[in-house]
């Protein structure tokens, strides 16, 4: 029994943040994960639209729509989705450090101008010590 180690895991930091700052950080995370999914998706759609338009020799007419119009529309839609894929890749690259929980916490601690977290921590520690002393009596 003497080789048991006691681990004290009761020391917790409290970060006080206003609603707007929290919302901004959540939106950064949302942008990262949305861009992470959207960029490859739009790239795949662009490739699937442009390849038939560029590699096919001719398209058949569909009703009153000529085959060349269909070919040009596939190429134009492919270029538009390729631009969208580039935009989402850029957003993904710009927000690469905003989704990690440790980076979010570090930015919150760095931006803490009043440093009230330390004061709050000390006050709660003193209250806890008083409660423990009262219960031990």
Image (cartoon, rainbow, N blue to C red):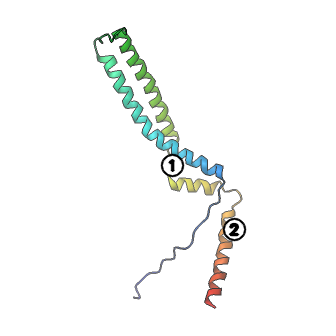
Q: Position of residue 16 (x, y in %)?
A: 65, 60
Helix, strand or loop for disc 1: loop
Determine the secondary structure under disc 2: helix
Q: Nearer the viewer, residue 132 or 92?
A: 132
Query: In the image, is residue 114 above or below residue 124?
Result: above
Res 81 quadrant in image? top left
Residue 26 screen position, x and y as percent = 56, 48
Q: Which residue sits at x=47%, y=44%?
A: 33
Q: Is residue 62 left or right of residue 93?
A: left
Q: Dot 1, how many residues are within 10 Å of its Cα: few (below 14), some (14-19), or many (20+)?
A: some
Q: Position of residue 42 (x, y in %)?
A: 41, 31
Q: In this figure, which residue is indicated by the disc labeled 1? A: 99
Q: Quadrant of the N terminus?
A: bottom left
Q: Counting residues from the N terminus, which is met first, the one under dot 1 or under dot 2?
A: 1
Seen in the image, is 35 located left or right of residue 22? left
Q: At which x and y percent is residue 73?
A: 40, 16
Q: Which mark is residue 119?
A: 2
């Amino acid at each position: 029994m003497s080789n048991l180690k006691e681990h004290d895991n009761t020391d917790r930091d409290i970060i006080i943040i206003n609603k707007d700052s929290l919302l901004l950080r959540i939106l950064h995370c949302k942008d990262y994960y949305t861009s992470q999914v959207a960029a490859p998706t739009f790239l795949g759609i662009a490739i699937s639209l442009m390849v038939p338009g560029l590699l096919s020799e001719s398209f058949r007419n569909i009703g009153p729509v000529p085959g060349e119009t269909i070919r040009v529309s596939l190429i134009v839609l492919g270029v538009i989705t390729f631009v969208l894929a580039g935009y989402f890749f850029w957003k993904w690259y710009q927000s690469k450090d905003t989704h990690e929980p440790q980076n979010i916490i570090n930015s919150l601690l760095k931006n803490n101008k009043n440093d009230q977290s330390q004061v709050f921590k000390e006050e709660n520690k003193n209250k806890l010590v008083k409660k423990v002393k009262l219960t031990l009596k």
